[in-house]
Amino acid sequence: MIAKLHLYRSMDPAVRKMLPEAMIQLAYGRIFKALPFKKVSKQLGESMAETSEEIRPEDRQTVAAVSQAVQLMSRYTPWESMCLVQAVAAMNMLSRRKISSTLYLGTGKDEKDQFAAHAWLRSGPFIITGAKGRKRYTVVGKFAKELT
């Protein structure tokens, strides 16, 4: 408990401020995942499109803070908060800040050579969520949320 308190205190204030929002958005992402994808996919943005690999310099720190907040809080949710849930949560947080992002859906084989699906989120040149192992997956869908 003391170690967690020390970690919290040493955390970047921008990330610390985003933690409650990350928890709420992860809950939304979990609900999103439970609904029929065909009905909710329109909320993700333009299908089969991508946003620019460029990012405004002033958005770099915000993008990093959103990534850290979502990945940290996903470890403490009482529900499953894996790749798609994290990607939806981070996309919503970036959207609220008028930062564009692209959500990717991929299929492939996992470490045990079993069929698997994966989701990750990119903003500018940065992978916000789902970076680990994404190269093993073939992109089968992408959704661009272009904001200015």
Image (cartoon, helix red, strand yellow):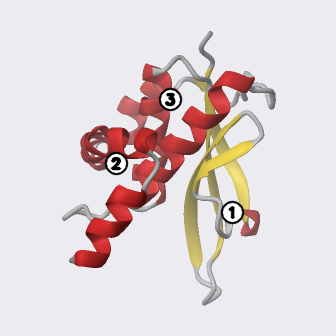
Q: Secondary structure at mark 3?
A: helix
The C terminus is located in which quarter?
Answer: top right
Horizontal and vertical percent position of residue 77: 24, 61
Q: Residue at x 74, y 58 (%)?
A: 138
Q: Quadrant of residue 73?
A: bottom left
**At 61% across and 36% down in the image, what residue appears?**
61
Q: Where, by quadrant of the figure, is residue 38 drawn?
A: top left
Residue annotated with mark 2 = 33
Position of residue 13 measured from the top left corner of the image (x, y, whole percent): 41, 42
Distance, label 1 to label 2, CA atoms, is: 19 Å
Question: Which mark is in front, 1 or 2?
Answer: 1
Above or below, 27 relative to 132: above
Task: Locate residue 12 relative to residue 61 in the image: left or right.
Answer: left
Residue 94's disc is 3
Residue at mark 1: 134
Q: Label for residue 50?
A: none
Q: Is residue 47 visible in this depiction of the protein?
A: no
1 in relation to 143, above or below: below
The type of residue carrying mark 2 is Lys
Q: Residues within 10 Å of mark 1 (few under 14, many from 20)?
A: many
CA–CA distance between discs 3 and 1? 21 Å
Marks 3/2: CA distance? 19 Å
The kind of residue tagged 3 is: Leu
Q: Earlier in the sequence, mark 3 or mark 2?
A: 2
